[in-house]
């Protein structure tokens, strides 16, 4: 609960440029294997891969935390240089630190560059976030899939179109059996779907379905937000997404208004999932808005 409060605070402050007390945020590591760690601070989960010579990092949280993140990576790696930084998508709680990692090569989907380089309006918050200078942008972009051979180890960047946004990357380490899902996965909570940035409920469902094909019971899964997860937990997230989509779709088919839909307790059995950043009401509203777009 506390974790999601911090996330909400972080997302809102990233939008409003307020000044939270960053000094209270600690960077905690969660070991995945001998050379991979998930870092938790404020904002999206970071994944680091420690190579023999250099380090690869996924997502950068917020700029005021960059020094602390670097200290943690130095401790874990023995002061190795961070060669690559991959962004799973453009949101500020995943890319805010990019400007402080300019000696690393930043990689992301092409739409991350598109969105970081132009003003973005967030309808859900009625806020405009201004375009970022080119020090934030990825140096290299791709459109569907890209392979990196980092010190000989294969790392696959897989785009999923129109899930959480239109520029989501899932990062798969086949030899390590580890996946960073970005915000296509909020563990045990209703996800935020950024409808104004190309996100859709059906795209999100397809995204989870497609990545599950690469997984087995031993796979370690890093969600965008929440604790480290396994395949079974991701499958229950997929089941929740489909169930909630189908429940809303059924009501839409019967031409029910959003007010009637909200009163019909569509989160039955999933009440706990609405205790985070996205409440049950907000999630139902998002699905309804998405499914009725252009039909009203
Ligand atoms: Zn996000």
Image (cartoon, rainbow, N blue to C red):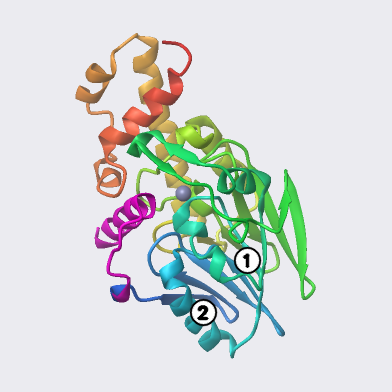
Q: Which picture quadrant has residue 5? A: bottom left
Compute the Cα span from label 1 to label 2. 12 Å
Residue range corresponding to the magenta coloring: 1-23
x and y, in percent, of residue 211 in the image? 61, 48
**Label 1's element?**
strand
Q: Tell me if residue 123 comes above or below residue 39 in the rendering.
A: above
Callout 1: 10 Å neighbours few (<14), some, many (20+)? many
The single residue placed furthest to the bottom in the displayed view is 78
Q: Tell me if residue 29 comes above or below residue 77 in the rendering.
A: above
Work out whether mark 1 precedes mark 2 in sequence or the reverse, and give the earlier one: 2
Q: Name the mark on residue 70.
A: 2
Residue of label 1: 85
Type of secondary structure dominating the magenta stretch: helix
Q: Which picture quadrant has residue 151? A: bottom right
Label tally:
2
Q: Please report the residue visible at 63 percent of the width from the left and 66 percent of the height from the top.
A: 85
Residue 142 within the magenta-colored segment of the rendering: no
- Give the left or right position of residue 134, taking residue 198 as reference: right
Q: Please report the residue visible at 30 percent of the width from the left and 12 percent of the height from the top.
A: 256
x and y, in percent, of residue 9 in the image? 29, 56
Residue 14 within the magenta-colored segment of the rendering: yes
Q: Tell me if residue 294 comes above or below residue 143 in the rendering.
A: above
Q: Is mark 2 within 8 Å of ligand 1?
A: no
- Give the left or right position of residue 194, taking residue 20 as reference: right
x and y, in percent, of residue 55 in the image? 65, 77
Q: Tell me if residue 20 comes above or below residue 270 in the rendering.
A: below
Q: Please report the residue visible at 51 percent of the width from the left and 41 percent of the height from the top.
A: 119
In what quadrant of the picture does the C terminus appear?
top left
In what quadrant of the picture does the N terminus appear?
bottom left
**Label 2's element?**
helix
């Amino acid at each position: 609960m506390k974790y999601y409060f911090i996330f909400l605070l972080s997302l809102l402050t990233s939008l409003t440029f307020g000044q939270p007390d960053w000094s209270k945020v600690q960077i905690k590591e969660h070991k995945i294997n001998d050379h991979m760690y998930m870092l938790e601070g404020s904002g999206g989960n970071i994944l680091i891969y420690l190579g023999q010579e250099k380090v690869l990092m996924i997502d950068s949280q917020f700029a005021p935390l960059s020094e602390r993140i670097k200290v943690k990576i130095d401790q874990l790696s023995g002061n190795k240089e961070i060669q690559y930084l991959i962004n799973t998508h453009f949101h500020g709680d995943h890319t805010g630190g990019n400007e402080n990692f300019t000696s690393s090569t930043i990689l992301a989907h092409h739409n991350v560059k598109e969105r970081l380089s132009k003003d973005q309006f967030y309808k859900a918050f009625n806020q405009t976030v201004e375009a970022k200078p080119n020090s934030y942008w990825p140096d290299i972009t791709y459109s569907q899939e890209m392979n990196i051979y980092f010190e000989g180890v294969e790392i696959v960047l897989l785009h999923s179109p129109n899930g959480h946004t239109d520029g989501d990357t899932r990062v798969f380490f086949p030899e390590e059996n580890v996946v960073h899902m970005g915000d296509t996965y909020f563990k045990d909570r209703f996800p935020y779907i950024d409808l104004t940035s190309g996100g859709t409920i059906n795209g999100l469902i397809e995204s989870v379905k497609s990545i599950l094909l690469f997984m087995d019971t031993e796979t370690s899964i890093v969600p965008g937000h929440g604790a480290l997860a396994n395949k079974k937990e991701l499958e229950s997230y997929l089941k929740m997404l489909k169930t909630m989509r189908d429940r809303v779709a059924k009501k839409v088919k019967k031409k029910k208004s959003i007010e009637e839909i909200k009163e019909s307790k569509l989160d039955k059995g999933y009440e706990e999932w609405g205790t985070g950043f996205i409440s049950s009401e907000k999630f139902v509203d998002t699905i309804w808005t998405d499914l009725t777009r252009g039909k009203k």
